[in-house]
Amino acid sequence: MTLGGMILGLAVRYIFPNRSTYGAALLPAVGAAVASAVWAALTWAGWKFDGGWIWVVSFVLAGVVAILSAILVSRTRRTFDAEMLQRLSRA
Protein backbone atom coordinates (compact mmCIF):
# COMPACT_ATOMS: atom_id res chain seq x y z
CA MET A 1 0.00 0.00 0.00
CA THR A 2 2.71 2.46 0.95
CA LEU A 3 4.70 1.72 -2.19
CA GLY A 4 1.60 2.24 -4.32
CA GLY A 5 0.97 5.64 -2.76
CA MET A 6 4.60 6.54 -3.32
CA ILE A 7 4.39 5.58 -6.98
CA LEU A 8 1.22 7.65 -7.40
CA GLY A 9 2.96 10.64 -5.83
CA LEU A 10 5.93 10.16 -8.13
CA ALA A 11 3.62 10.02 -11.14
CA VAL A 12 1.90 13.23 -10.06
CA ARG A 13 5.30 14.89 -9.75
CA TYR A 14 6.10 14.22 -13.40
CA ILE A 15 2.61 14.84 -14.77
CA PHE A 16 2.03 18.28 -13.28
CA PRO A 17 4.06 21.38 -14.22
CA ASN A 18 6.19 23.54 -11.91
CA ARG A 19 7.98 20.62 -10.32
CA SER A 20 11.01 22.84 -9.85
CA THR A 21 9.15 24.64 -7.04
CA TYR A 22 9.29 21.70 -4.62
CA GLY A 23 11.62 18.84 -3.76
CA ALA A 24 11.80 15.53 -5.56
CA ALA A 25 10.65 13.51 -2.54
CA LEU A 26 7.73 15.69 -1.43
CA LEU A 27 4.90 14.22 -3.50
CA PRO A 28 6.00 10.58 -3.19
CA ALA A 29 6.21 11.08 0.58
CA VAL A 30 2.76 12.68 0.66
CA GLY A 31 1.30 9.84 -1.43
CA ALA A 32 2.89 7.18 0.78
CA ALA A 33 1.77 8.85 4.01
CA VAL A 34 -1.80 9.37 2.87
CA ALA A 35 -2.16 5.85 1.47
CA SER A 36 -0.82 4.36 4.70
CA ALA A 37 -2.96 6.54 6.94
CA VAL A 38 -6.14 5.86 4.95
CA TRP A 39 -5.39 2.13 4.87
CA ALA A 40 -4.88 2.04 8.64
CA ALA A 41 -8.01 4.09 9.31
CA LEU A 42 -10.13 1.87 7.09
CA THR A 43 -8.84 -1.34 8.64
CA TRP A 44 -9.55 0.07 12.09
CA ALA A 45 -13.04 0.95 10.82
CA GLY A 46 -13.58 -2.72 10.03
CA TRP A 47 -12.89 -2.86 6.30
CA LYS A 48 -11.32 -6.13 5.13
CA PHE A 49 -7.65 -5.72 4.22
CA ASP A 50 -8.06 -8.07 1.26
CA GLY A 51 -11.17 -6.34 -0.10
CA GLY A 52 -11.06 -4.34 -3.29
CA TRP A 53 -12.59 -1.12 -2.04
CA ILE A 54 -9.95 -0.47 0.59
CA TRP A 55 -7.35 -0.43 -2.20
CA VAL A 56 -9.43 1.85 -4.41
CA VAL A 57 -10.20 4.36 -1.66
CA SER A 58 -6.61 4.42 -0.38
CA PHE A 59 -5.11 4.95 -3.83
CA VAL A 60 -7.68 7.53 -4.93
CA LEU A 61 -7.23 9.61 -1.78
CA ALA A 62 -3.44 9.36 -2.04
CA GLY A 63 -3.59 10.57 -5.64
CA VAL A 64 -6.01 13.40 -4.88
CA VAL A 65 -3.95 14.67 -1.94
CA ALA A 66 -0.75 14.46 -4.01
CA ILE A 67 -2.40 16.47 -6.80
CA LEU A 68 -3.69 19.09 -4.37
CA SER A 69 -0.27 19.28 -2.74
CA ALA A 70 1.42 19.82 -6.11
CA ILE A 71 -0.97 22.61 -7.01
CA LEU A 72 -0.93 24.36 -3.64
CA VAL A 73 2.80 24.09 -2.99
CA SER A 74 3.77 25.33 -6.45
CA ARG A 75 1.28 28.20 -6.30
CA THR A 76 2.43 29.22 -2.82
CA ARG A 77 6.08 28.97 -3.77
CA ARG A 78 5.67 31.09 -6.92
CA THR A 79 3.80 33.75 -4.92
CA PHE A 80 6.41 33.75 -2.16
CA ASP A 81 9.26 33.94 -4.67
CA ALA A 82 7.64 36.89 -6.47
CA GLU A 83 7.15 38.74 -3.18
CA MET A 84 10.72 38.02 -2.12
CA LEU A 85 12.03 39.28 -5.47
CA GLN A 86 10.08 42.51 -5.01
CA ARG A 87 11.44 42.98 -1.48
CA LEU A 88 15.00 42.28 -2.54
CA SER A 89 14.71 44.53 -5.60
CA ARG A 90 13.73 47.49 -3.40
CA ALA A 91 16.70 47.04 -1.11
Image (cartoon, grey):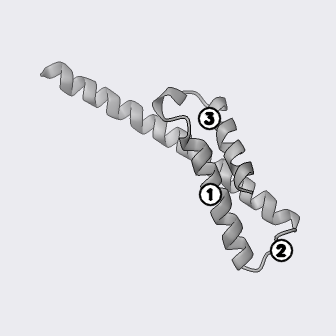
The residue that appears at 23% across and 24% down in the rendered structure is: 86
Q: In what element is the residue under mark 1? A: helix
The residue that label 1 is drawn on is: 34
Distance from Cα at disc 3 to Cα at disc 1? 15 Å
The answer to whether the residue labelled 3 contacts the one labelled 1, judged by CB atoms less than 8 Å apart, is no
Q: Which mark is residue 48?
A: 2
In the picture as drawn, the residue positioned furthest to the top comes out as 89
Sequence order check, earlier mark of 3 and 2? 3
Q: Quadrant of residue 47?
A: bottom right
Q: Which residue is mark 3?
A: 13
| Mark 3 or mark 1, earlier in chain | 3
Mark 1 packing: few (<14 Cα in 10 Å), some, or many (20+)?
many
Vertical arrangement, residue 62 with respect to residue 28, above or below:
below
Mark 3, other Cα within 10 Å: few <14 / some 14–19 / many ≥20: many
Report the amino acid beneath label 2.
Lys
Element class at badge 3: helix
- The answer to whether 75 appears left or right of 65 in the picture is left
Contact between labelled residues 2 and 1, with CB atoms less than 8 Å apart: no
Please tell me whether mark 2 sits on a helix, a strand or a loop: loop
Image position, residue 48 (x, y; %): 83, 74
Image vertical order of residue 55 relative to residue 30, above or below: below
**What is the spatial separation of the Cα atoms under label 3 and label 2, in whole angstroms?**
31 Å
Q: Earlier in the sequence, mark 1 or mark 2?
A: 1
At label 1, the amino acid type is: Val
